[in-house]
Amino acid sequence: MKTSIYNYFINLYRIKRDGIIGSYYKILRSLNSTTPSLLNLDNINKILVLAPHPDDDAVGCGGTLIRLTEKGCYGETVFFTNGRKNITDERNEIAEIRRSEALRGSKKIGIKNSHFLNYCDSRLKQDNNVVDFVLSCLNDLKPDMVFTPFFIDNHPDHTKTAKILALAANQYNGDFLCCCYELWSTLTPNYIVDTTSFMEKKIAAIKIHESQTKETDLVDLAKGLNRYRAIASGQPIQYAEAFFVASKKDFIKMSKSL
Ligand SMILES: [Zn+2]
């Protein structure tokens, strides 16, 4: 075994013992199973979607969002970054392109209102301004469910988004379910959603993000992952999106173990 891989597992064990992975598995164990169940969306009427980048909603949870909005659920999305690399990046056109793609993508998904925070790519800050903004969205919308990337994800903007939600949730008096979606890392899901009937529309929503799909085949990425999730679920379905769903209380508890 290579030393780096060995150290990786040793560190994973240490984190698992007392950190976020511990909280994660404790919550999974309390559910008595690590086999994901089908997520019941019947009582979900208002959703808030947190998308660190303008294509994350479509790629990570687009099928589930379409399923919800098609049944009449009202949704709003917060887009945190705008595609510019830093504040001296003069490519203002990329921010405009990504904003336009985000708006058209949201329309395809059925989201009624979008918010743009305009942080630079990979430079999302976990500051009071952004936490207060998410808190104001929670207070205004009072969502039943909030979609966010997970704490463990291979992109700093994604992990920061989850932490920002936890900080805002800690100050919010209402309650909601946190629905963590997969992006640049897979997660151990406790729920899946059958997205078979919504895959065509999800792919159309991803293709709207042309500035990104020409660099990375996001359609194949989503199709492969969603097909795997369907087969692994043992359910007779073609495509599924997988989530780690936690109560607001458990989500905050996990963030504190970081
Ligand atoms: Zn992203």
Image (tube, rainbow, N blue to C red):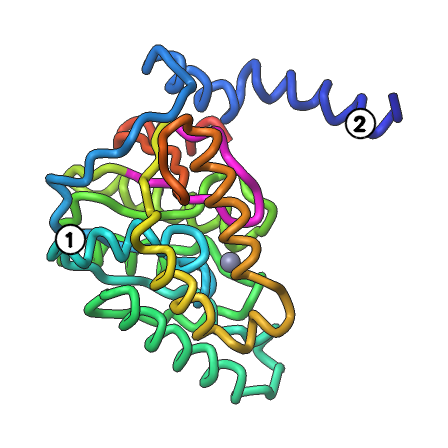
**Residue 16 higher or lower than 204, as above or below:** above
Horizontal placement of 246 versus 75: left or right? right
Residue 17 x, y percent position in the rendering: 56, 14
Q: Name the residue under label 2.
A: 5
The residue beneath circle 1 is 139
Tell me which amino acid carries mark 2.
Answer: Ile
Residue extending furthest right? 2
Magenta segment boundaries in residue numbering: 178-189
Disc ID at residue 233? none
Q: SS of the residue at dot 2?
A: helix
In this rendered view, identify the residue nearer to me: 20 or 226: 226
Q: How many residues crowd around disc 1 within 10 Å: few (fewer than 14), some, or many (20 or more)?
A: few
Q: Taking 214 as reference, is 209 left or right?
A: left
User: For the point 33% across and 76% down, which residue is it?
Assistant: 103
Does residue 69 appear to the left or right of 225 in the view shown?
Answer: left
Nearest the viewer among 44 and 236 is 236
Q: Position of residue 186 (x, y in %)?
A: 54, 38
Disc on the earlier residue, 2 or 1: 2
* Relative vertical location of residue 54 with respect to residue 226 in this rendering, above or below: below
Give the residue type at disc 1. Answer: Asn
- Tag 2 and tag 1, C-beta contact below 8 Å: no
Residue 244 image position (x, y, % from top left): 39, 33
